Image (cartoon, rainbow, N blue to C red):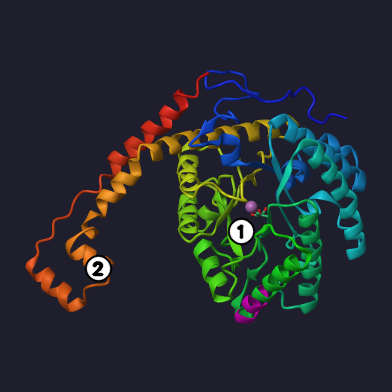
Amino acid sequence: MAYFTGVEKIKYEGSDSRNPLAFKYYNADETIGGKSLRDWMKFSVAYWHTFTMDGSDPFGLPTMERPWDQYAGMEQARARVEANFEFIDKLGLDYFAFHDVDIAPEGNNLQEYSDNLDDIVARLKKHMQAQNVSLLWNTSNMFHHPRFMFGAATSNNADVFAHAAAKVKKQLVIAKELNASNYVFWGGREGYESLLYTDTKLELDNLARFYHMALDYAKEIGFDGQFLIEPKPKEPTKHQYDFDTATTYAFLQNYDLADHFKVNIEANHATLAGHTFEHELRYAREHGILGSVDANQGDMLLGWDTDEFPSDIYNATLAMYEILKNGGLEKGGLNFDAKVRRPSFEPIDLVHGHIVGMDTFALGCRAAQRMIEDRVLEDIVEKRYESYNSGIGQAIIEGKTSFRELEAYAKENTIKVESGRQEMIKGILNQYILGAGVTARV
Ligand code: XUL
Ligand code: CO
């Protein structure tokens, strides 16, 4: 059965196309900076937003009409597998990502959980082989069920810790079975609501113990994917331990985990933390922990995690700049952790969401690559810091001076500061973004 009837394979038609069901900027096999767009981006469909969400929100009932919702239980889970691979084929995607509970019903106990997953994983594997599709990452949902109300690895209740361990253990076996590129931890309930009853030190120690046990088990079964932590400052929990990339990095270093984990950076989580998307990417890149990206965007007027499909080419350009400077994402990719708006309730809207997301990043990639080729920002930055290339600046960098000597120097010297030319630089950036749009004509 076809679930996206009336949708043919989405083709690249260039920026002059007026066909809504065509790519305007994403030409998968076009080479940019020595790599195809397909390989730079590694777009992934997020199973949860695309195949399990129904449009309900705290104020209203489901709005979405999904053809697989005519089934229930395992029949529905099997239908979703078919829908996923039809969707992947029509959009020309190569990757997908899921939580355990997205792909199969949880069942009434861990045995049913495991049996249901085995049925679905066998089907996923068959399709993956037939269509040459890969699993970007899987994860365990440890925030939905009431047992996780105080967290999973950071729960006050050791039985919850044990249950969470059982779930992650199963997911690691699945990650190995499906040859996942990464395994993700997002700690939506790993944090606290009130310090009044929380032992934060014990909770953080336990979180580290949990991660070490996960690493040990992955090693034991021979899963060699990359472990990722996805930072988020809040929502659903008031304060989450993996607040942002810098906090996560300090945690990893503190607990001897830094060599084994990277981060999965989500645009909307960055803005919730009071950072820009590119700030988080820059920090991760410079510390060698940029693993993967959850590509979406927030709404600055709303201020919560709205998980919208990326359409902002300015942000996408700055994000792609960091990703290109990183030499790509290695085992990572751009996962659309994004959902269509509640009133965009038809299956075709899922197609439009992915098209605009893929086009937005392709446009950003073209603009960023050209800026890097022309050394636009590189030359500006190099010039801005040139005082450290010789004289007293060089002595500072080489550790060959002291406060005493610097004071003597400062007394004799007259400081001459130069304008940063921020407005000029923003104008140049605009030119590159607009230029990338024009040259995507076929
Ligand atoms: C929640 C979020 C999750 C993670 C995976 O904000 O981003 O969907 O990506 O659990
Ligand atoms: Co996410």
**Alpha-carbon distance for marks 2 and 1?**
37 Å
Q: Secondary structure at mark 2?
A: helix
Residue annotated with mark 1: 230
23 versus 343 height, above or below: above
Q: Nearer the viewer, residue 247 or 42?
A: 42
Tell me the crowding category of disc 1: few under 14, some 14 to 19, or many 20 or more residues within 10 angstroms, Cα based.
many
Q: Secondary structure at mark 1?
A: loop
Q: Which residues are magenta?
A: 201-207
Answer whether residue 130 is visible to the viewer in this image.
Answer: yes
Give residue 287's position: percent from left, percent from top.
48, 61
Where on the picture, by quarter, is residue 147?
A: bottom right
Where on the picture, by quarter, is residue 219?
A: bottom right
Answer whether residue 346 is visible to the viewer in this image.
Answer: no
* Marker disc for residue 250: none
Q: Amino acid at mark 1?
A: Glu
Residue at the spot 42% in from the left edge and 33% down from the top edge: 433
Give residue 393's position: percent from left, percent from top.
22, 63
Give residue 188's position: percent from left, percent from top.
66, 62
In the image, is residue 256 part of the stretch drawn in magenta? no
| First-in-chain label (2 vs 1) | 1
Tell me the crowding category of disc 2: few under 14, some 14 to 19, or many 20 or more residues within 10 angstroms, Cα based.
some
Q: Is mark 1 within 8 Å of ligand 1?
A: yes
Residue 214 left/right relative to 229: right
Residue annotated with mark 2: 396
